[in-house]
């Protein structure tokens, strides 16, 4: 049977990046390491191992300084659910906690989803199996706290058999609600988790986000900065209006109810699985009426709500409202909506920016800033604060990074349209104006130096040709490197002194 967790005292914590590439001695006597498996979190390493009989297992070895929850360890082996991964052994050896689980070669639900759409019927089956696993966990007093497709293992593909795994963040409840660290995967996190609240309700929200993703084919909050995601979770409902199947839409609405006291739990999910229609608490955002601006299946009467939605759907919003110029129906709707607002500054917005020849993305930036200047500054859907600028320059120089092209587009737009000064109009972003001044001074100094070097007779012609004006090359590496220096003036001065 499973071994109990060792009570050996922890030794001193080491750096979190200290990785273990070998088995603890207590396990090396019984297992041979086959391979190191990729991990997403920072708390552990995963090793694929094989015993003398040829059986394959996974050993999860926690990093130094990370202590697994002993109460969770004590309860997991007794769980008798086909939809919860069995923990075969737990212990502490060589200064680290470890867990041994079966090896599941078919991977996780995320990998299965990436192979193609699963369909509505499969989404319902996923909901049924994960609900069974969550019910078993909650009955034992365990809240998973990090349910997401990556933590759902595919025990078998046909017929589909899923099991909830990875209990690194799980918490045993001694009461109905406790507060704990806010560690979580943000896209699947319940609104109340932002304050550290832990109750079974947050796992049911995560299930709702998974079902919504299966039904729509879109990952939640994809491509958005953490600031925007947190703001959305804290202030707005997650709509299920884009879920086509009415039964799955009902399930998502029940599970994605913002108030954890009114959110569906296992009881309502089981009733739904049996063909029933449990009541869904009406959300204020879903019940909102009026003659607001239509966009993405909703009408927006509040400026701040519209601003957040535009940031979350930046590419679509820019083309939808401004891609066809003044002839577009969406633009006419926007202008009529603005005209009804009791704010005379809208005239300057419309005449000075929205009806000009500015690119659609720049027009959208001016609109978002006017709608809600309290938002963190964003452009092309990415946050652009002073702290983000060095990272933007690094992304623009990394051709292999998926955000490389977006970073290049942002960098060029910041320069060509003086957007740092526009972004400085958001609350708390005034430093961007000073950064823009330094950036343009750095670029002028660079270009003066390049021109001087080209004029020197001793300069080899080939070298002179390789010295670009700032912004002339593609990607604009020099231009954005100077932006990074402008964002960190102390570092720039240190480099000059050296």
Image (cartoon, grey):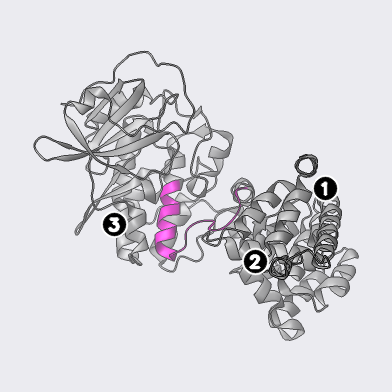
- The residue singled out by tag 3 in the image is 125
Relative image position of residue 154 (x, y in whole percent): 26, 51
Q: CA distance from mark 1 to mark 3?
A: 52 Å
* Label whose residue precedes the other's in the sequence (2 or 1): 1
User: What are the residue bounds of the magenta stretch?
Assistant: 206-226
Residue at the image position 32 percent from the left and 41 percent from the top: 165
Relative image position of residue 88 (x, y in whole percent): 21, 31
Residue at the image position 37 percent from the left and 62 percent from the top: 114
Which image quarter: residue 336?
bottom right
Q: Between residues 491 and 213, which one lies in front from this camera angle?
A: 491
Which image quarter: residue 172?
top left
- The residue singled out by tag 1 in the image is 431
Residue at the image position 75 percent from the left and 41 percent from the top: 491
- The residue singled out by tag 2 in the image is 475
Q: Residue furthest front?
A: 458
| Quadrant location of the C terminus in the rendered image | top right
Q: Between residues 429 and 283, which one lies in front from this camera angle?
A: 429
Residue 481 appears in view:
yes
Q: CA distance from mark 2 to mark 1?
A: 26 Å
**Residue 378 higher or lower than 466, as above or below:** above
Relative image position of residue 312 (x, y in whole percent): 62, 60
* Label whose residue precedes the other's in the sequence (1 or 3): 3
Q: Is residue 162 shown in magenta?
A: no
Residue at the image position 89 percent from the left and 64 percent from the top: 345
User: Is label 2 or label 1 in front?
Assistant: 2
Q: Secondary structure at mark 1?
A: helix
Q: Residue furthest bottom?
A: 327
């Amino acid at each position: 049977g499973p071994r109990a967790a060792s009570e050996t005292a922890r030794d001193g914590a080491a750096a979190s990046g200290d990785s273990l590439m070998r088995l603890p001695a207590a396990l090396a006597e019984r297992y041979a390491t086959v391979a190191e498996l990729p991990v997403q979190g920072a708390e552990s390493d995963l090793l694929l191992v094989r015993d003398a009989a040829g059986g394959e297992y996974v050993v999860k070895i926690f990093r130094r300084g990370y202590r697994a929850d002993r109460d969770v360890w004590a309860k997991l082996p007794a769980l008798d659910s086909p939809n919860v991964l069995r923990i075969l052994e737990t212990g502490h050896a060589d200064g680290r906690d470890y867990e041994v689980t079966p090896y599941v070669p078919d991977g996780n639900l995320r990998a299965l989803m990436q192979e193609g759409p699963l369909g509505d019927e499969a989404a319902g089956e996923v909901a049924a199996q994960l609900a069974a696993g969550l019910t078993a966990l909650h009955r034992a007093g365990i809240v998973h706290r990090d349910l997401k497709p990556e933590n759902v293992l595919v025990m078998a593909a046909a017929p589909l058999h899923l099991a909830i795994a990875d209990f690194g963040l799980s918490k045993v409840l001694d009461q109905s609600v406790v507060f704990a660290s806010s560690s979580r995967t943000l896209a699947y996190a319940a609104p109340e988790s932002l304050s550290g609240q832990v109750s079974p309700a947050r796992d049911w929200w995560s299930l709702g986000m998974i079902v919504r993703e299966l039904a729509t084919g879109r990952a939640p909050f994809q491509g958005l900065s953490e600031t925007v995601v947190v703001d959305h979770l804290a202030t707005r409902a997650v709509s299920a209006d884009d879920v086509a199947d009415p039964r799955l839409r009902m399930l998502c609405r029940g599970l994605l109810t913002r108030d954890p006291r009114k959110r569906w739990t296992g009881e309502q999910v089981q009733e739904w699985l049996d063909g029933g229609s449990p009541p869904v608490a009406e959300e204020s955002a879903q019940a909102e009426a009026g003659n607001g601006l239509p966009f993405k299946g909703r009408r927006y009467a509040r400026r701040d709500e519209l601003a957040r939605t535009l940031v979350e759907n930046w590419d679509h919003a820019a083309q939808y409202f401004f891609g066809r110029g003044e002839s577009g129906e969406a633009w006419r709707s926007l202008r009529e909506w603005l005209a009804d607002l009791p704010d005379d500054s809208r005239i300057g917005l419309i005449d000075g920016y929205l009806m000009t020849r500015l690119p659609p993305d720049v027009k959208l930036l001016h609109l978002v800033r006017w709608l809600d200047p309290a938002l963190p500054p964003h452009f092309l859907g990415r946050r652009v604060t002073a702290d983000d600028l060095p990272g933007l320059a690094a992304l623009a120089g990394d051709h292999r990074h998926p955000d490389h092209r977006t970073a290049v587009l942002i960098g060029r737009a910041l320069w060509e349209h003086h957007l740092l000064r526009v972004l400085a109009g958001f609350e708390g972003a005034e430093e961007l104006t000073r950064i823009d001044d330094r950036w343009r001074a750095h670029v002028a100094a660079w270009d003066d130096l390049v021109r001087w070097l080209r004029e020197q007779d001793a300069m080899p012609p080939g070298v002179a040709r390789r010295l670009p004006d700032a912004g002339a090359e593609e990607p604009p590496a020099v231009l954005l490197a100077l932006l990074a220096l402008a964002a960190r003036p102390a570092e720039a001065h240190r480099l000059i002194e050296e």
